[in-house]
Image (cartoon, rainbow, N blue to C red):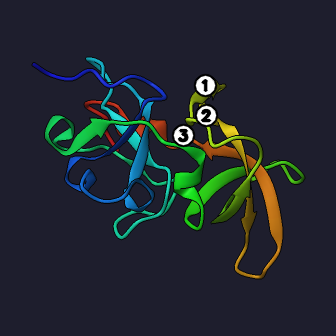
Amino acid sequence: MKIKFKLGQILCERCSLKKPANQRYYYVVIQEETNDKYLVIQAINSNSLYVSGTSINPSHPEEDLVITQLKASYLLNQEITVMDSFFNKPVVSDAIGYDGKDTIIKFTPVNDDLIGNVYYEIKSKKNSTFSGYLYSEFYRKEKFVKNYKQ
C-alpha cells in the first residue's frame, strides 16, 4: 500500500533511525503527490546530501522515508533555515538556541510557505546573530508538476 504523505509532515530517512535523534536528516513535506504533481520534500537541516531549504522529489519515498517527530533541541548546532524577524528574509545558519520548551515541531502553511512553531536563534558565519521561526520556502513549483515541459 502506498503511503500518502501530507503537507507539513516531518520525515527522516529510514536508514537513519538507529542514529541519535540529533544526528538524523529531517525533511518536511511541502507538496503532496497528486495526479498532476510530484511529492516534494525539503531539507530542514543541512546534511551530507542537501543544504537546508533544498527541495527534493524523492524517487522511492515509501522505502526511504518514515514519518517522525522532531523536537526543537534536535536541531541545535545544525544548519537550518529561519525567517529572520528583523529583515523578514530567509537565513540559513547554525541554530544556537530556541525560545520556550523543547516542543515537537509542527509546520503551518502560510501562503505558499511553511512556518514552524519554534523560534530559533542562529549565528551566521560572520558571527552575527539572527532569530526567527523555522521556515520552509517553496519556490520553482513548476519544476515539480508532472508532464512539465521546460
- Cα separation, mark 2 vs mark 3, equals 6 Å
Residue 89 in picture, x, y percent from top left: 77, 52
Q: Horizontal placement of 14 versus 109: left or right?
A: left
Q: What residue does disc 2 label?
A: 113
Q: Horizontal placement of 107 versus 55: left or right?
A: right
- Cα separation, mark 3 vs mark 1, equals 11 Å
Residue 117 in the image: above or below residue 94: above
- Nearer the camera: disc 3 or disc 1: 1
Q: Are marks 1 and 2 in contact (CB under 8 Å)?
A: yes
Instruction: Give me the residue at 74% from left, 70% from top.
Output: 123
Instruction: Give me the residue at 81% from left, 61% from top.
Output: 130
Numbered mark located on residue 26 in the image: none
Relative to the observer, which residue lies in front, 45 or 113?
Answer: 45
Label 3, secondary structure: give it: loop
Would you identify the image quadrant in which residue 39 lies?
A: top left
Q: Can you say which quadrant of the picture contains the C terminus? A: top left
Label 1, secondary structure: give it: strand
Q: What residue does disc 1 label?
A: 109
Q: Among all residues in the image, which is located at the extreme left?
A: 1
